Amino acid sequence: MSAQAVIAANRFGLGARPGEIVAIGGDAHGWLRAQLVPERVLPAPFAALPSTGDDLAEFQKWLADLAASGRAPQTAMEAGVSDATPARATGVESEFRRRFAPRYAAALKARFGVAINTTRPFFERLVHFWSNHFVVSGTKPSAVALPPSFERDAIRPHVAGRFVDMLLASSKHPAMLVYLDNVNSVGPASQVGRNPDLRRAFAAQAFIPARGTGLNENLAREILELHTLGVRSGYTQADVTNFARVLTGWTVARPPRVRGAQLAVRRQSAIGLFDFDPDAHEPGAHVVLGRAYAQQNEAQGEAVLRDLVRLPVTAEFIARKLARHFIADDPPREAVARLAQVFLDTDGDLAQVGMALIDLPQAWAHSQRKFKTPEEYLVSSLRALPGLELDGTQLASAVTALGQPPYRAPGPNGWPDVESEWLGPDAVWKRFQWANETARRAAASVPDPEWLALDVLGASLGGETRSAIQRADSAVQGLTLLLASAEFQRR
């Protein structure tokens, strides 16, 4: 059993399924390269999820229902969900949970179903990686239904494409415009900004409730800090403000600007739902990172985004995140430099960057340097136990208990990707509890835990862990030891 096949399945992939390491054989590099091609057919579970237009409409329908009952919140955030458990939730909060919990469970079932059963786990890991880079989180009430369709429409199509296309798609996607409040951003010198009557009308027609109108810097700041350049990369507050002015008018198609049949057609795709409102756009040229942009309409913002991708600091930021994810929490400088150079040389071709990652000798070190996040741990466990089926509600309960509910990152910077954030006594105990509970469910279909351990861990299975599994009093105990082992919790 090839050691490189073990690494390919467990470090680049999402954890080995029974028989997968043997199937990879002696061509681990080829197995990974073959996955770096665009997805021609959307996996059926994702195709079955609601459209972006439906996701957008659902929150507005809920607000409308509240308004009809005389309980409409003054802002979207006032419609939020606190830390109260469902049993203690009452009133508006309880209705919020009832309305959106089934959609969340269905999205989790789709996400985990594809991750568990895919034959392209490297591609799927990259989907998860980029979704955690361009974050839309359902913790914000107005975006509660949007993350799954955002991942499907803005991330998946570009995982093996060009970074600039993913950046443009994510920045213009309704989910990102809603999540980072750009739908309500108005240029001070725009038609809306200078005319009190237009300003009141704009506020009344706001996509989500807001306390007035004005320039909002959230999207501009996060694109610079989290999506392209990275924090402390040399941009100034003036760059953020000017970029925010550039992005005014980037919004979501809605009445009265878009009406009737035209709106219905545009709701059929996420791309069609992007709208540019010239009345809200700050006129004139704006200077971002020392360059003046005088383009008209949304072309101005697109020009800034394209220039951001060409900067060496962006290449290094992206390269460091990839190297951190696939190699080590503190990635080797030479590995980062190599990935950054390929990013620059290929104009951000992510398939070519992925090929360079596969060719890095540091990525094939036998030591397991990366501690699995809770979602990675759950996915790899279920891939190792393909006969164990969990429904959406069970998945939501399990991954929430382990501390990383998908589509609900705590902020726009996403989930942490370093061991220190996940490895602690409480976290380890919760994983052991989950391992034991899962072993009880799955033991009947795993009569020989030692055989399974060899099948999914291969050469990474240590002698002490193997001996402990051999000495186990029962299949339940043996399987618990496998799932709770250090080898299984690292990749």
Image (cartoon, helix red, strand yellow):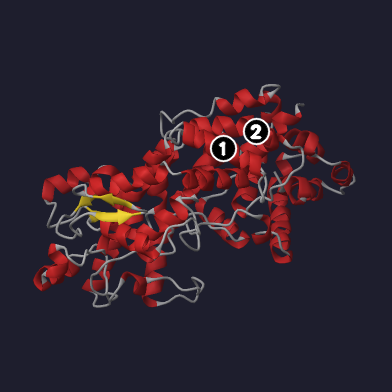
Amino acid type, residue under disc 1 in the picture: Leu
User: What residue appears at the point 57 percent right and 40 percent down from the top-left corner?
Assistant: 116
Pick whichever, 474 or 129, lies toward us.
Answer: 129
The image position of residue 74, as x and y in percent, is 28, 76
Q: Relative to 163, is 6 on the left or the right?
A: right
User: Quadrant of residue 362 in the image?
Assistant: top right
Mark toward the start of the polypeptide (1 vs 2): 1
Q: Name the element at disc 2.
A: loop
Q: Which mark is residue 360?
A: 2
Q: Name the element at disc 1.
A: helix
The image position of residue 387, as x and y in percent, is 63, 39
Q: Would you call the spot at circle 1 few (<14 residues within 10 Å), some (14-19), or many (20 or more)? A: many
Amino acid type, residue under disc 2 in the picture: Leu
Q: Relative to 357, is 89 on the left or the right?
A: left
Image quadrant containing the C terminus: top right
Q: Are marks 1 and 2 in contact (CB under 8 Å)?
A: yes
User: What residue appears at the point 24 percent right and 58 percent down from the top-left corner?
Assistant: 248
Does residue 17 appear anywhere in the picture? Answer: no
Q: CA distance from mark 1 to mark 2?
A: 9 Å
Q: Which residue is mark 1?
A: 339
User: What residue appears at the point 44 percent right and 64 percent down from the top-left corner?
Assistant: 139
Pick whichever, 354 or 456, lies toward us.
Answer: 354
